[in-house]
Image: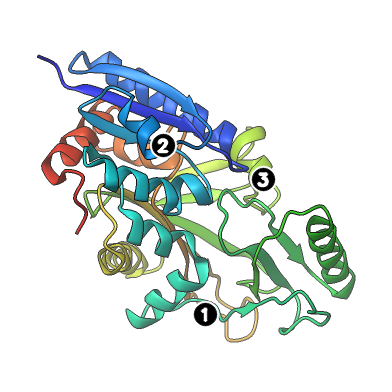
Amino acid sequence: MMPRVLVLGGGPDAEREVSIKSATAIAEGLRASGRHEVRLEIIERLTGAELKALPGDVIFPYLHGPWGEGGPLQDVLEADGRAFVGSGAVASRLAMDKVASKQIAGMMSVPTPPMFVLSSTQDRCPFGFPVVVKPIHDGSTVGLHICGDAQGWERAMGVIAGERAKGLVRSYMVEPKIGGQGWARELTVGLLDNQPLPIIEIVPKDGLYDYEAKYVRNDTRYVLDPVLPAGVGERVQGWSVKIAAAMRCRHVARVDFMLEQPGAGAGGGGQVYFLEINTTPGFTDHSLVPKAAKSLGLSMSAVCDRLVELAIRDGGGVR
């Protein structure tokens, strides 16, 4: 009898539509392999009782955002007891929290930009411009602000104050923009069973890899195995493995870095900085982890099959 795989998508967070695309692509990939009986469920939130009512031997959750990939859903999955794809609740909470992720990177001696957690009374920028302001517990660059000067800072603070007035309360952090007013290169490392995939360089047309560049426009370039300064590739792949292992991530992840170009900003000289780790990276045919896997001869179906195998191997009891 073929294993029954329950694929979950959707969720209550800002990245719901992206999650539906990822979950749909995963379900299609699993069906194409012919090795599984696949059921796709698009959900909002769900309780333990609601999850138990859904049939499946293995659960393949692919929700993006704080509830779906930040720990709450993983609590439900662990209590359910069935094998499931992805990190457990502890790792998911650490990875979703950008402050905690940066602290762990620092413990691993991985360079990461300094940061400051914004309070509701914050009126002055704690760093020299330009700076990046972003939510601590969101992904897909939701709520991202690049502030090149005091006017940009005031605009960002006005948007955040408007969110609070409407009841949307997010915790924000600010950090110096890597490269200053100059240019920096964005690198990403996918992990499959904590083994690094080939590096991809992200080259947005206007220099900012925001939500529009990721999911709306088609002008972002992705360079597989880019030419990098000596040792950079080995460092970012090695750091990715160390950080994921320290957080107890499992099965799949993606780790993002910025490479500062020589001469860019104060002390610029080709330094690499850790940005964040994502335990539920985008998973369509156009997403970065499947792209990197494809370069190794692994089709979308093969990667999805492998993730189900890893879930069966590790079960639902996350250690």
Q: Which residue extends farthest right?
A: 151
Crowding at dot 2, Cα within 10 Å, few <14 / some 14-19 / many 20+, comes out as: many
Picture quadrant where residue 302 is located: top left
Q: Name the one closer to the observer, 234 or 23.
A: 23
Crowding at dot 3, Cα within 10 Å, few <14 / some 14-19 / many 20+, comes out as: few
Name the kind of residue labelled 3 in the image: Lys
Residue 59 spot, x, y in % from top left = 28, 33
Left or right relative to 21: residue 117: right
Residue under pointer 1: 269
Residue under pointer 3: 205
Name the kind of residue labelled 1 in the image: Gly
Circle 3/circle 2 CB separation < 8 Å: no
Circle 2/circle 1 CB separation < 8 Å: no
Q: CA distance from mark 1 to mark 3?
A: 24 Å
Q: Earlier in the sequence, mark 1 or mark 3?
A: 3
Q: CA distance from mark 3 to mark 2?
A: 28 Å
- Helix, strand or loop at label 1? It is loop
Left or right relative to 205: residue 59: left
Left or right relative to 146: residue 25: left
Residue 278 spot, x, y in % from top left = 43, 54
- Helix, strand or loop at label 3? It is loop
